[in-house]
Amino acid sequence: MRLHLRARWLAAAVFGLGAAGHADVLPEDRTDVLYHRYEGGGLTVQGPSVLIRKKFGDSFSASYQYYEDLITSASIDVLSQASAYKEKRTQHNFNLDYLHGSTLYSVGFIYSGEPDYKSNTGFFNVSQSMFGDLTTVSFGFTQGWDKVGEVDKGVFQKYVGDADHRNWSLGLSQVLTRNMLLGLNFETDENDGYLQSPYRGVRFVDPFASKGYSFGPAVAPNTRTGTAGSAQLKYYLPWHAALDGNYRLYSDTWGILANTVKVGYTQPLFTNWTLEATARYYWQRHASFYSDLYAFEDSQNFTSRDRELAQFHSLTLGLGGSWEFHPGWPHWVDKGTLNFNYNRLRIDYQDFHNNLIPSPVPGDEPLYTLDANVMQFFISFWY
Amino acid sequence: MSKTVSYKIVSPLLLAAVLLGSMLLGGCSPIEPWVKPYEREHLADPIMSFDRNPISNGYLDHVFEVREGARGATGSVGGGCGCN
């Protein structure tokens, strides 16, 4: 929980909803087996994931996904206020699709569990094709119920609160020309309850402390409403390649404003290879109550030193490769792909200082930067 | 005289009503797809999918969401090309 907190229920929902396809066809029957590894900033998160999807008759399709995070953390947050730890998170996604005419209905449930955080999420999504299948519109609703706890040295201590989440989404996919697709997404989410990490405190000036500062408890608001809108374009290039661009704007009641720009290029090579390159830039303004160093303890109603709420920008460069093969056995497998994906992530914080580097004046430490490697290997089968 | 005047007034109104009516009725007729099914070969190519590998995209979304304040609106709603 120390790593993820309130983001997970939505992330989990994305896992489940991401498989939604055209409204007039059921998603493809496929199985993916993935190994993922994130390494950076003293944190390693790795584990397997398996996604199985199968049609039943002409109208139903069901999927199940297992996902696991094995976390070893000695991040700056942990080293500043606690000690390194290891923990495991598992997630189970269940999804059922029903196709009726040009309408696709999806329902699902997601459970995520780890020693100090339990999350249950239900979702519903409906998609409709229209105008000669040139347009697909979708609507989704997600409700999450979380239980936030506290663990000390691997032993569960107590539950510190509940957090509820509701999310509404609207989507539009539009064929613009014979070579161009447009996607529009709009989401709004409401969160209420315990919306902070029990492990992360705030830093304030303390003239009596040897370092010149001390840590105290953080107090986040118990409601948060966010809105996000995005547009993406995909263009087919004449030499059999694809170019895509994506822009997203986000703002919420905590004062965070964020812009995300992503571009990608996909190039099939020879007969069996597909290569992909992506670049993603992200910038966010800090939450209105965030501070790296408060002037004194309890200096305002709401306080936080969560890096996720700081002001920063980040750049992620990615490369991916896929090799397609057609196994003769078992006979019911149509094709398979072996895939590799690597992303290099760098975050430059603009108001989060590295307090692990001693400084004669609190707050004068160098700004923190994070470099991380994100890798995925996966094999996929279609049947 | 009054008959002529009324014709002069009514005729343009009638014409406008007929034009408006035909436009409205035209709006009720099915929209002709401007990209015909046989023109969707490129759109049907797997490289044109917004979400070619859901398990991989979902994982990357997760990596970003736990480190950033922003979230949402990353889901793809399908290609919508009807070219299966």
Image: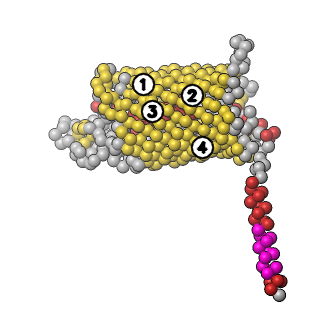
Q: Quick one: SS at disc 3?
A: helix
> Which residue is identified by label 1?
A113
**Reading the chain from its start, which is encountered first: label 3 or label 4?**
3
Report the residue at 71% width, 12% height from top.
A329
> Which residue is identified by label 3?
A8
Callout 3 environment at 10 Å: few (<14), some (14 to 19), or many (20+)? Answer: some
**Reading the chain from its start, which is encountered first: label 1 or label 4?**
1
> Which residue is identified by label 4?
A171
Visible residue check, residue A284: no
| CB atoms of marks 1 and 4 within 8 Å | no
**Reading the chain from its start, which is encountered first: label 3 or label 2?**
3
> Which residue is identified by label 2?
A95
Residue type for callout 4: Gly
Residue B53, magenta (yes or no): no
| CB atoms of marks 3 and 2 within 8 Å | no
The dominant secondary structure in magenta is helix
Q: Quick one: SS at disc 2?
A: strand
Indicate the position of residue A63 as horizontal and vertical percent values: 59, 25
**Relative height, residue A351 to residue A88 (above, below):** below
Visible residue check, residue A144: yes
Callout 4 environment at 10 Å: few (<14), some (14 to 19), or many (20+)? Answer: many
Q: Nearer the viewer, mark 1 or mark 2?
A: 2
Instruction: Please tell me the numbered disc located at residue B28.
Output: none
Residue B16, magenta (yes or no): yes
Chain where mark 2 sits: A
